[in-house]
Image (spheres, helix red, strand yellow):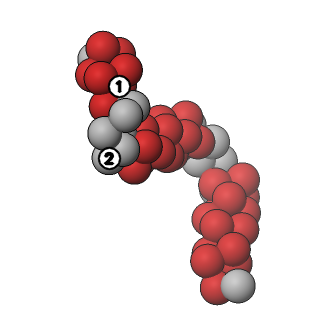
Amino acid sequence: MAKTKLVKEFFQYLGENKKLWLIPIVIIFLIIGIVVVISQSQAIAPFIYSLF
């Protein structure tokens, strides 16, 4: 519950303070994090390696 509140407050901050340029950076960090978590699986690692 607290995590969703934190995310909600973060996006409210971005909207109110006109910091919308941070949204693509946050999305890229999330994608990189997801790729790192997924690449821990040995079956997917060769495919992730070929992306970079």
Residue lying furthest bottom? 2
Q: Is residue 31 above or below residue 33?
A: above
For residue 36, which numbered disc appears in the image? none
Mark toward the start of the polypeptide (2 vs 1) = 2
- How packed mark 1 is, by other alpha carbons closer than 10 Å (few <14, some 14-19, many 20 or more), is some
Q: Quadrant of the C terminus?
A: top left
Q: Is residue 42 above or below residue 12?
A: above
Q: Secondary structure at mark 1?
A: helix
The amino acid type of the residue labelled 2 equals Gln
Q: Is residue 48 above or below residue 1?
A: above
For residue 48, which numbered disc appears in the image? 1
Q: Is residue 23 left or right of residue 40?
A: right
Q: Is residue 14 left or right of residue 44?
A: right
User: Could you tell me which residue is drawn at 61 percent across and 77 percent down?
Assistant: 3
- How packed mark 2 is, by other alpha carbons closer than 10 Å (few <14, some 14-19, many 20 or more), is few
Q: Is residue 1 left or right of residue 39?
A: right
Q: Nearer the viewer, residue 31 or 7?
A: 31
Residue lying furthest front? 43
The amino acid type of the residue labelled 1 equals Ile
User: Could you tell me which residue is drawn at 31 percent across and 31 percent down?
Assistant: 45
Displayed quadrant of residue 8 = bottom right
Displayed quadrant of residue 6 = bottom right
Residue 27 percent across, percent down from the top left: 55, 40
User: CA gap, disc 2 to disc 1?
Assistant: 10 Å
Q: Quadrant of the N terminus?
A: bottom right
Residue 31 visible here: yes
Q: Secondary structure at mark 2?
A: loop
User: Could you tell me which residue is drawn at 64 percent across and 85 percent down?
Assistant: 2
- Which residue, given by chain and number where applicable, does mark 2 sit on? 40
Residues at badges 2 and 1 in contact (C-beta under 8 Å)?
A: no
Displayed quadrant of residue 49 = top left
User: Could you tell me which residue is drawn at 72 percent across and 63 percent down?
Assistant: 12
